[in-house]
Amino acid sequence: MCGIVGYVGPRKVVPIVLEGLKHLEYRGYDSAGIVFLEDGALHKYRSEGKLANLEEIMDEVETKSHIGLGHTRWATHGPPTKKNAHPHSDCTGELVVVHNGIIENFQKLRKELQAKGHIFTSDTDTEVVAHLIEEYLEDDLVAAIRRALQEVEGSYALGVMWSKEPEILVAVRNQSPLVLGIKEGGGSFMASDIPALLPSTNQVIFLEDQDLAVLSNEDIKIISLIDGAPRHREVQEILWNIGMAQKAGYRHFMLKEIFEQPQSILNTFRGRLNPESGHVNLPEIGLSEDKIRSFSRISLVACGTSWHAALVAKYWLEKWVGIPVEVDIASEFRYRRLLLGPDVLVIPISQSGETADTLAGLRLAKELGATVIAICNVVGSTITRESHGTIYTHAGPEIGVASTKAFTSQLTAFFLLTLYLAKVRNTVDEATLKQLGRGLLDLPAVIEQELPRLHAELEVLAEQFVQCRDFLYLGRGLNFPIALEGALKLKEISYIHAEGYAAGELKHGPIALIDKDMPVLALVPPDDVYSKVVSNVEEVKARHGRLILVGCARDEHLSDLADDLIVLPAVHPEMHPLLYCIPLQLLAYHIAHRRGCDVDQPRNLAKSVTVE
Ligand code: AGP
């Protein structure tokens, strides 16, 4: 998954593109490049590694150019080297392309183009697009692009420039995100994501698949890539300011986003949850009550942390709505025989709204006639636009690659959905509905209160585990998915091998791992499986495991068992997943930071995996 930025307008292009790329580095960052047009020629600069390396190069470059493109890369084809960094050129060097996505038939196209004499200089799939456009280029760039892309299979967001048409940039979107910006007084922008535009404008246009846009200083014209017919796209005002997408004084985006969780949970239920009755209002679902009552089961589809949110939701939905719920990892869902139909509600969950496997699952579900309602954090993202409806998590931009506030916002959205469905399907009485709603309403203030203490405590505790090589997380019931999530947080940012396990599974194998050097973190909230988890904890203790327990403040028994005890206040038991994940986020954060890892941009990872 890569980052694209383009600009044409009255201002100098290089500072705009570099600043935009800086706000996209979370999308992929193993190489970067920029190109601008000056004195009739294209000037291209590329570098390996972080964007800062390109910025260093550009510090030495004098230019007044007002039109250009930039790119940060997360390698999919070809190692992250300078020659593979975008932009890529045709044989003449007069045409350049930046790309996000995968050209699935690039090998075939490359061979055909080489047979026609085209010389390739990179290992990338992207380069074939530049040479293919060149093949059809006479005196109309748009016509050549439209003709060339008829032969391309795969996903692409493209930015294209040609020195012979020096006043325009061309943007094309097909299954990879691309958003445009416009500015009063002139100037047009393209970017892979909103934060890149916010320093300059909050007036944005979300391109749809097969849109081709021509950007000039004066305006943006959008046509169909397929037949050239004009297409109208609404201009939307983005309420995020760039400050929300910046660190606001925190050492890392991840830490900022952990501390934003009281607000993001509140923002997600604000205006939807009636504080008095516990009734939930979700008009964005866009389904009649009869349709909602017609569903025989629910199918949840997601990846990574979003899949963990789905695992929690299964407990809530089955307990309070009495409907069978299946949960699938999207990359498995899309390749198994799906028994879906109009009686099934399918819910894809995605922070980015661009995860390829989840998007593919969504499309399959729609083909089979299911109703698809997404839970997503990004307005206008592909998953939201291809679903029948979307429940947005109002977490704001999540820049840290490791998901935190988006996760607890997904849980909030799922709990709202649970209350909503329970009311419509009449599976919960009014008193219980009110009590459940109160549990969620009270949560942000509790988290707000506890965060500073937990931050300080976990910073100290983390010191003991900076050198450890393995970690085991245990949980049961609602908190088994939180054990999985805690393990994922630790492994993805500290590179320590960590596993989450159902506590009851310990004796079926993993207990062989337990010795004095194996840290075991167990979630032991006061719930209906408490005594079972305590038994599992005692099994670990008997084998001299290194026990970290997370439990309720008033629990004396746990302090006898634990080597280290993290205490949390009492909250409604259904709210434990949202509260108990927070010390796990902080533990992972502090261990990773102490290990000198790049917390916000962990190695090998990207914020959204828009390729299979
Ligand atoms: C979460 O910390 C990870 N970065 C990753 O597992 C992520 O949750 C997964 O890639 C799904 O992303 P999405 O929610 O944007 O679809």
Image (cartoon, rainbow, N blue to C red):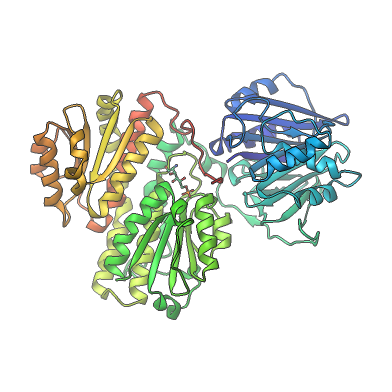
Residue at the (50%, 64%) spot, across then down: 365
Residue at the (18%, 33%) spot, across then down: 514
Q: Measured from the top left, where is residue 127 in percent x and y?
A: 72, 36
Question: How many numbered circles does the render carry?
Answer: 0
Q: Nearer the viewer, residue 489 or 16?
A: 489
Q: Nearer the viewer, residue 85 or 110?
A: 110
- Using the image, determine if residue 539 lies above or below residue 48: below
Instruction: Tell me if I can see residue 554 in this picture.
Output: no
Seen as rendered, the residue at the extreme top is 60
Q: Measured from the top left, where is residue 521 in percent x and y?
A: 22, 38
Residue at the (27%, 55%) spot, across then down: 575
Seen as rendered, the residue at the extreme right is 139
- Using the image, determine if residue 64 lies above or below residue 60: below
Residue 436 sits in quarter: bottom left
Q: Nearer the viewer, residue 282 or 527?
A: 527
Whether residue 240 sits left or right of residue 138 in the image: it is left
Residue 598 sits in quarter: top left
Whether residue 519 sits left or right of residue 532 in the image: it is right
Residue 520 sits in quarter: top left
Q: Nearer the viewer, residue 426 or 210?
A: 210
Whether residue 261 sits left or right of residue 544 in the image: it is right
Q: Measured from the top left, where is residue 318 in percent x and y?
A: 30, 66
Instruction: Tell me if I can see residue 232 in this picture.
Output: yes
Quadrant location, the N terminus: top right
Whether residue 233 sits left or right of residue 260 in the image: it is right
Residue at the (29%, 48%) spot, across then down: 579
Q: Measured from the top left, where is residue 149 in percent x and y?
A: 75, 49
